[in-house]
Amino acid sequence: MKHIIKTSVLLGLFMGTVGSASAQEVTPYIGIGYGQTTVDSGISNVTGSGDLDEGGSDGKFFIGADVAENFAVEFEYFNVSSDSVELRLNSGDTFKFDGTTYAALVNGVKINAEGQIYAVSGRYNHRVGNNGTLFGRFGFANWDIDINASAPGLGTDTDNRSGTDLMFGLGASYDINRSVVIGVQYEHIQLSDGLDSIAYLTGDIAYRF
């Protein structure tokens, strides 16, 4: 429930910003992105045969609106798939997370993280020529991530982490025509509550109404 309330507040902030600009010409757009996720999970000091993979391929969905000549607001949904963070351990392997050292008691222990992130941000656009744009963004992200652990013969366990933290991004886009825009951008979302950060490098395509 707390996650739903925070997400609703972010969406309300997005809608309120668009509404406050209604006296000006507002151009809405919608889009998707897909690319490489890089995770700093906070897991460290993996020993023995332990193998930590902190990256994967994930997608995002976004809606936005140009509310001024060089300024837009966006609401984004990011996916964190189960293979974005994966730690594999055998008996005797140890690792450190959130200040505590853990040890695997059997072979075949697996730990992964999955969840979702909702973000709202302001975006400053700098036009380059007739079709190009360089931009930067800054905002807040509400995230909810499950850390899942499983071991043969011992079952599974889930530790839920969530919070609302800062996010920023840099990117470039190109107008194919009046309606279709393609681009690439890097977005960094700072996390708390044991986790450190998640970054997305995506190729995007958007439709401007």
Image: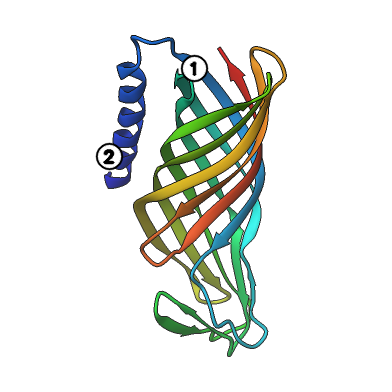
Amino acid on which the number 2 mark rests in the picture: Ile
Report the residue at 67% width, 32% height from top.
183
Q: How many marks?
A: 2
Q: Residues within 10 Å of mark 1 (few under 14, many from 20)?
A: some
Question: Disc 1 or 2, which lies upstream in sequence?
Answer: 2
Residue 34, given in percent of the width and then of the height, sits at 65, 40
Is 49 drawn above or below residue 24 in the view shown?
Answer: below
Is 24 situated left or right of 43 in this image? left
Label annotation for residue 204? none
If the image is split into quadrants, where does the C terminus sit? top right
Q: Is residue 204 visible?
A: no
Is 174 situated left or right of 40 in this image? right
**Which quadrant holds residue 30?**
top right
Amino acid on which the number 1 mark rests in the picture: Pro
Query: Toward the viewer: 73 or 96?
Result: 73
Label annotation for residue 5? 2
Report the residue at 70% width, 14% height from top.
177
Query: Toward the viewer: 46 or 160?
Result: 46
**SS label for mark 1:** strand
If the image is split into quadrants, where does the N terminus sit? top left
Is 201 situated left or right of 116 in this image? right
Report the residue at 53% width, 78% height from top.
44
Residue 55, given in percent of the width and then of the height, sits at 64, 59
Report the residue at 52% width, 39% height from top.
136
Label annotation for residue 28? 1
Residue 186, given in percent of the width and then of the height, sits at 60, 46
Q: CA distance from mark 1 to mark 2?
A: 25 Å
Q: Is residue 19 visible?
A: yes
Query: Toward the viewer: 138 or 102?
Result: 138
**SS label for mark 2:** helix
Query: Residue extending furthest right?
Result: 176
Q: Residues within 10 Å of mark 2 (few under 14, many from 20)?
A: few
